[in-house]
Image (tube, coloured by chain):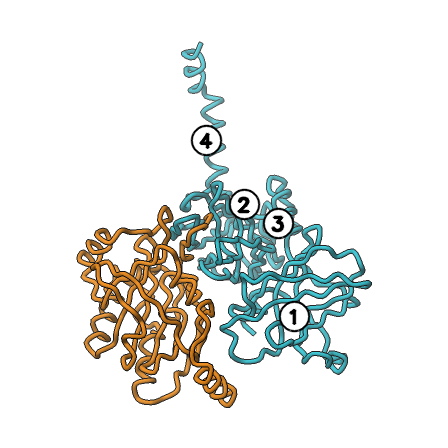
Amino acid sequence: MKRSTQYGLLVAILICTPPLVAAAKIGQAAPDFTATASNGKTFRLSDYRGQYMVLEWHNNGCPYVGKHYKSGNMQRLQKQWTARSVVWFTIISSAPGQQGYVTASEENKYLAKMQAAPTAALLDPTGEIGHLYDAKTSPQMVVINPQGILIYDGAIDDKPTTDLSDIDGATNYVNLALEQAMVGKQVETPSTRPYGCSVKYSGSTH
Amino acid sequence: MRGIDSSRRFSPALTFGVALVLYAAAVQGAESPIPHGTVELIAENRWITPGHGFSLGLHFQLEKGWHIYWINPGDSGEPPRVTWQLPPGFRSGVAEWPAPRRLVNSSIVDFGYEDAVTLIVPVHPQTSLAGQPLAQLGLEVRVLVCREMCIPGRTQLSLALPIKSRPPAADMRHRDLFAAARKDLPRRAPQNWKFSVDDAKDSFVLAANPGPQITQAIFFPLVEAQIDNSAPQTLQPRATGFRLTLRKSDRLLKPIDRLKGVLVLSGNHAYLIDAPVGKRGAQKNNAGNGTHEIKSLREGQQK
């Protein structure tokens, strides 16, 4: 298993640039993208090579997202990891007219109200970034290492509920991935089923 | 005219009638609200006979467009969860889940139920329930109800059933509901269908020989992250059966020994599948290691 993963890595490095439509895969290069943030700035993923990165799919009306914001859990993670030079992008892939779609100023108000502290909140109304990473739910979490390799993709933790009381005692997969990778260990759980509300891409019917 | 009607409402006979209805509602449990729907706890039998297992039903009714989830919810969502509060001498069994539907939403595919569904839960009372005229069976249901939005709901249900030392008797009011729910439960596939699953690099190929009439087949995986829920499932009818190609999930990082789930064939016939996964072309070596049925979905999922 380990051997084939390494071989996969080698192949990924040799091929170097995956085609634009290739969805993200564990152990392979994280697909690059450029996006406009709610603060008006433009961010390009590949500009942050050399740093760990976290992508967090977001929808402010989803009760699973609410669980992690009302409890302050998400904000705590954002502050804790950005303080350690991790780049944290909150990504909103709801299409205009779909539930969870926000304008830049609406998102800025939400960030201020929740005292959220990501590096930036990226607006993805076309769903391009969401589809690139095959994001299914909010929240869905992705961790990328300084070499630009995707090292975690899936749920925020192992308690797929909307209960705030389930946060204490849950195993947080983002923390695990970052902690293990930062001390040079193999990420033990690189992929889990993400839990939450479905991402409301354009063309969503329910 | 209306005045006469309303004065009649207070006639002693009618008051008695209303009281009877209220009493019946209290004994039989009533519909409890959940977001955009209701849930009701119903009993298949009119009373509890000590030592005789019986079934309770959790009957969900949903407003148009809203859905709840199967035991494996698919790409998003969460199945209903139940916490029982049973009196001493009672034990609840494993819930039986009717076959779900594919709920397709852009590139996201969930598994669940729209409109209405009844989950059946067996309950086992002890032989000795000495001196108790009535048993109060309670439970808490937590359920996620979704359309564009997902709304979590939580409700308390309870049902008082008399205990009698007479043979069990069906409650005719719920007979149709239980019969309909049982019809939708996945059943064991006939042994001679010979299910097999081949590991074919990027996909699993599920094959069986139920005869040539299979024109429709949908597989619902019991375990998350084994197959790609949103990938099309390709059916190839064959002379004696069919082959169904299921794309593997990108999240499947290790080989699996068995593929478990529910297969729904033409005519909405649902079957429990638990088949060993063999390498392509090597399925003949699996002859002694054939399909075995799981007794219930929950059991299969935990294995």
The amino acid type, in three-letter code, at marker 2 is Ala
**Subunit ID for the residue under disc 2:** B
Where residue B187 sits: x, y (%)?
68, 60
Labels 3 and 1 in the same subunit: yes
- Badge 3 is on which residue? B181
Name the amino acid type tagged 1: Asp
Subunit under mark 3: B
Query: How many circles with numbers are drawn on the protein?
Result: 4
Colour chosen for chain A:
orange
Q: What residue type is labelled 3?
A: Ala
Q: Which of B270 and A112 is in front in this view?
A: A112
* Residue plotted at (73% across, 75% down): B290
Task: Please check whether the numbered discs 3 and 4 fall on a single chain.
Answer: yes
Q: Which of marks 4 and 2 is nearer the N terminus?
A: 4
Residue at the spot of label 4: B19
Left-right relation of A24 to B197:
left
* Residue B36 location (% of width, % of height): 42, 43
Q: Would residue A163 be visible to someone looking at this image?
A: yes
> Of discs 3 and 4, which sits in the foreground?
3
* SS state under label 2: strand
State the residue at coordinates (31%, 80%).
A178
Q: Do labels 2 and 3 share a chain?
A: yes
Q: In which quarter of the image is the C terminus of chain B?
A: bottom right
Chain coloured cyan: B
